Each structure stands twice: as structure tokens, then as C-alpha cells.
Amino acid sequence: MDSKYVSYAPFLFAVFLMSCPHPSARAADDATASWSFEEPGPTVKDRSARGLDGTATGCARAPGRKGQALKLDGTSGMTVPDSPLLHAGKGFALECWVMLDKGPVDPPMNIITKANEYMLRVDPNKAGGHISFYVKTKDASWEPRARGPRPEAGKWYHIIASWDRRKAWVWVNGKLTASRKPGECVPTSAPVVVGGPAEGVAGLVGRIDEVRFYGHAIGSVGLARRTWIGDKPEPAEKRTDALFEFNETTEGWHEKEGSDVSVRDSALCATLSRDDSLLKVIGLDINAAAYPVATVRMAASCGKRGVCVFVSDKMVKEVPFRLIADGAMHSYTLRCARQNRWVGQIWGMGLRVEGAEDTQVRIDFIRLGETSDAPPDLRILSLAPERRIMAMNKPAAVKAWVRNVGGPAKNAVARLSVPAGVEVEGNATRPIGAMGLDEQKELTWTLQSAKPA
């Protein structure tokens, strides 16, 4: 028997159950130019085989995110000669991994710049020290910028920045920020400078690795493919059902940052260290239109909001839900088809908990279907007496609103408990009866007290 208690003043109430345009996805290896830093000499080969080689001047090598990285001292960097392939054009994107030796300082530090076209940098400390992305449009304006988070020293940051002639955005370790940036970008003959001084900005002090330039803007689907899959091959066999029960295995669900994810007592268990930590699964092939409703049954130790993420070949949708973070199992029904453009073949799903760190989660199941597929879950929306102070021997009404956020309930009842000296007229237990998903019902009790209460 499941129950949910909510106290209001001296009363106790219980409910019982008796029986963006969406560009097509592109592979992560479709970069126009790509530079790793495995070579010990000054020449850095373009791995795209387009001949856009760079020259690293005064740079050493150090352990990178993969293999070796370019180690920078604020004056050194890599230069790539101008090419039409490296112009902003009708849209472009930049990608790299960066680690600072020390936190943001004054002046700003360059990450990737092409003078008078585009710039990815660490803003000066006095301006917040954020990772920011700029595009200089035809009106000769660099602003507005897309401003990301403030980096810390000694930590790797995966950065992807893009512009599509309408807006500029920057994605840093899971955090996406954007700004309106309409217009055209006039091409220049300036070289691309990676990590070195450029456009009046000092060079980076730290390391940079896995630098890529894309001759097209990256949309939300493309971003998801790069950050969820990267260079790894997708599973050969696709999963075509969306019923994750976690009876014996994790069923492919994992967390990118290496959190311990396991199955215990037929539940997926994990500790989400940050509020952007994402549990996810890929390798799906599920028609979104055939599954308009998602049902999650889970327990969380803390957090303010849960978010389910669905990625198809045509969309990326984040569907939030209000989390009850009391450590107990609760059902959450998400009407996904109410999202604009719920379309395409879903290849990835994710779940995160926002508003807390080191959140302990236990997930009983995650299911996609035509309707809610969960036990009934009745929530008390409000419980209030008609007046705050009860007069002696004068009846007072107490009203409650109850809503079912889970599967169908057949025989539900509600019971009101009152403090000593207060009596309920008639039966304190009220029948609720059957309740469907999202159905609400109002209940009323009449109370009397032998003395003011």
C-alpha cells in the first residue's frame, strides 16, 4: 500500500491506493580542418588531408586530452595561413579542448582567432573571466558575444562554438549559451591563430588539444552527436523498444564523467556529481511519433528538477519535470508529443537532475509508450481550512485538491487526521474512486472544536 502524507498546520492528510531549425546530423569526423599535436616539430599536419597545415612557434608538447597537447606560455601558438575554407562564410564552428595553467587574468587570453572575423577567448578577469565566442559582422561589431562559464585552472574544458548568420552559441562541458548575432561576416586574409597572441589579445597560458574547424554551423542534433558519441562508432545493433526495466543490467545506460553506474535490487543506481551530469543511452532506433509519452519511476536524494533528454535525427528535446527529492520512489509522466516537432528516429536518451550535486538516484524504470505506464501516484496539490482559527463549536471546512500524476487508479481513498480536541463530522475517510492520468478531484471535510484551535 503506497501512501503520501502532507502536513498543513495541525492537520495530516493521507491518500491511499487500495488495490531551432533542426539541421540533419553530421558525423563528428566531417571537420574541414583538424589538428592534433602528436608531431614533435613545428609543422602540425591537418588530419583532414586538405593541406591546411599549421606552424607551431615556440610551443612545447605536454600530455593532452588525447596523446599530446600544445603547451602554451602566453607568447607561443600555432598559425594556419588564410584559406577560403577557414572563412566564417554562411556559418562555421570551432571545437577544441583547453586547460589553463592559471585562472582568468587581465588581459584576455586567445584560444582561436581569425582577426576581424571570429574569436574564441577567455575574457579578462575584470570582465568575469568567461569563455566567450565572438563573430565580427558586417556592421563592424564584435558584440554581442556568446558567454560561457568561467574556467578553473588545471581542468580540461571541451568547447564547441558555432555561428549560423542568425545566432552565435558556445557549449562548454555541457553548458550551452547563445546570443542573437544576425548578419554577414566579411572574410579577411588574416591567418587562424591557435593559442597565440592575436587581435590585441594575449596568448593562452596552458594547453590546447584536438582543434577542429567546421565549414558549416552545427545545430542541436550535430552537437548532441559530437558530445554523446564523438569519434566512437555507434552500436552495430540498434534497440527498437523503449522499455528500460533494469532488472539485471544497466541496459547500456552510462554517465560520461565516469560515475559508478550499476544495478541493485532491480534499479539503476548512480551518483550524479554535478547538476549537469547526464545519464544516457545511445544505439536506439525508435520512432518518436509512435511513442508520445515517457514514464519515469525514480528516487532522488536531492535536486530541484529532473530533465529527460531525447535525441533523434531531427530533434533534441529536453522535457523537464518537477522532482520530489525525498529519497522515495515516485512516478513522473512526461507528455513528450506536446513538444514542438516531436519527430524523427530517436537514437539517444538521457536523464539529469538539476539544482544539486552528489545526487543519489535509483531508477526503477524508464518507458516510452502511448500512455502512462506506471503505478498510480496521487499528489496533494493543496490542503487548506476555510479560516486559520477555528471558533468554539463552530463548524469549519477543510478542502483538499488531489491529482494523479501516474497510471490509472481504481480504488483510491483519502483520510484526514486531526489534532486532539478537533473532531471530523462523519467519516474522516473519503472515497476518491477511479482517477486517470492528470485527473484532479476536490475533497471536503467539516471540522468542529470544543475550544478555539
Image (tube, rainbow, N blue to C red):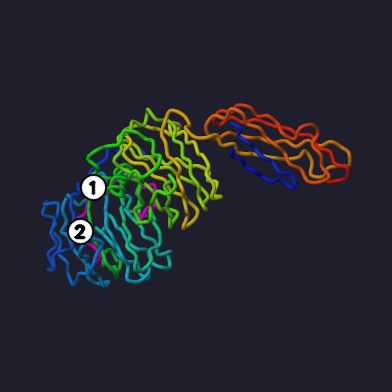
Q: Identify the residue at image location x=29%, y=70%.
A: 205
Q: Identify the residue at image location x=31%, y=43%.
A: 282
Which residue is identified by label 1? 28
Q: Is residue 326 magenta?
A: no
Q: Identify the residue at image location x=31%, y=44%.
A: 165
Of the residues shown, which amino acid type is indicated by label 2? Answer: Ala
For this view, does 430 lie left or right of residue 357?
right
Q: Earlier in the sequence, mark 2 or mark 1?
A: 1
Which residue is identified by label 2? 190
Of the residues shown, which amino acid type is indicated by label 1? Answer: Ala
Q: Identify the residue at image location x=16%, y=56%.
A: 82
Q: Nearer the viewer, residue 97 or 239?
A: 239
Q: Residue 59 location in percent, x, y?
A: 19, 70
Q: Residues within 10 Å of mark 2 (few under 14, many from 20)?
A: some
Q: Judge whether residue 166 can be spotted in this image.
A: no
Q: Quadrant of residue 158?
A: bottom left
Q: Residue 249 location in percent, x, y?
A: 35, 45
For this view, does 383 lie left or right of residue 319?
right
Picture layout, residue 59 above or below residue 220? below
Tell me the mark number nearer the camera, choosing from 2 and 1: 1
Q: Main secondary structure of the magenta part?
A: loop
Q: Quadrant of residue 404?
A: top right
Question: Quick one: SS at disc 2?
Answer: loop
